[in-house]
Image: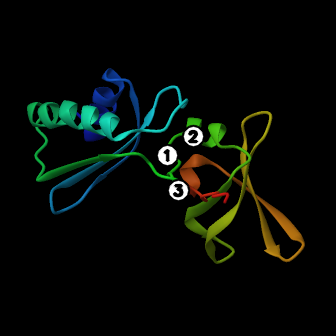
């Protein structure tokens, strides 16, 4: 049996979308978060419906049972789940949770910086006026999300 992530990623790509994230609950809910491949527009309700129709037929064929399928956009606080996401959103504010604590701390918020050699770091303020840099690798990250920037 194929891996659920691979099946959903392939199905989404087949109809023109990128799989951003996937959740499966013990209650049988499968949540799928998609984005457009060209990133030129936001995900619409019609896009979610298209991917949902594809998955509702493909998942049972691939041997995956579910009670409910939810397909949506990743939202303003979208998760960063792939290296490409980190590269794409360089220069933006993120919340980062490490798998293991660093000096007793796992949660950080700051500016995502990608170096010329694609090294990843987070620039964050530890005290007012004191900026620190946290260099990290993807395997160190438990989860990361964009911090929504809403302008009125």
Sooner in the amino-acid sequence: mark 2 or mark 3: 3
The image quadrant that residue 48 belongs to is: top left
In three-dimensional space, the C-alpha distance between marks 2 and 1, rounded to whole angstroms, equals 7 Å
The image quadrant that residue 19 belongs to is: top left
103 is higher (above) or lower (below) than 31: below
In three-dimensional space, the C-alpha distance between marks 3 and 1, rounded to whole angstroms, equals 12 Å
Q: Residues within 10 Å of mark 1 (few under 14, many from 20)?
A: some
Q: Which residue is mark 3?
A: 77
Residue 35 x, y percent position in the rendering? 44, 37
Circles 2, 1 touching at the beta carbon (< 8 Å)? yes
Give the image's coloring scheme: rainbow
**Which residue sits at x=57%, y=40%?**
85
Q: Residues within 10 Å of mark 2 (few under 14, many from 20)?
A: few
The N terminus lies in which quarter of the figure?
A: top left
Q: Which residue is mark 2?
A: 85
**Which residue sits at x=33%, y=34%?**
47
- Please tell me whether mark 3 or mark 1 is closer to you in this view: 3
In three-dimensional space, the C-alpha distance between marks 2 and 3, rounded to whole angstroms, equals 13 Å
**Which residue sits at x=42%, y=38%?**
43
User: Which element carries disc 2, helix, strand or loop?
Assistant: helix
39 is higher (above) or lower (below) than 73: above
- Please tell me whether mark 2 or mark 3 is closer to you in this view: 3
13 is higher (above) or lower (below) than 112: above
Residue at the far right in the pictured view = 129
Q: Is residue 117 left or right of residue 34?
A: right
**Which residue sits at x=32%, y=30%?**
12
Residue 81 numbered tag: 1
Q: Residues within 10 Å of mark 3 (few under 14, many from 20)?
A: some
Residue 34 numbered tag: none
Residue 141 x, y percent position in the rendering? 55, 56
Q: Is residue 120 left or right of residue 140?
A: right
């Amino acid at each position: 049996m194929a891996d659920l992530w691979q099946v959903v990623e392939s199905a989404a790509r087949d109809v023109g979308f990128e799989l951003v994230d996937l959740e499966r609950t013990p209650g049988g809910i499968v949540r799928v978060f998609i984005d457009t491949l060209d990133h030129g527009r936001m995900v619409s309700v019609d896009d979610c419906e298209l991917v949902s129709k594809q998955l509702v037929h493909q998942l049972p064929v691939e041997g995956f049972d579910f009670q409910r399928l939810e397909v949506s956009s990743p939202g303003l606080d979208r998760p960063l789940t792939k290296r490409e996401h980190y590269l794409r959103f360089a220069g933006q504010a993120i919340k980062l949770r490490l798998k293991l604590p660093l000096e007793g701390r796992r949660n950080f918020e700051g500016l995502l910086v990608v170096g010329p050699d694609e090294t990843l770091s987070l620039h964050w303020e530890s005290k007012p006026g004191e900026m620190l840099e946290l260099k990290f690798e993807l395997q160190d990250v438990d989860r990361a999300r964009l911090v929504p920037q809403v302008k009125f």
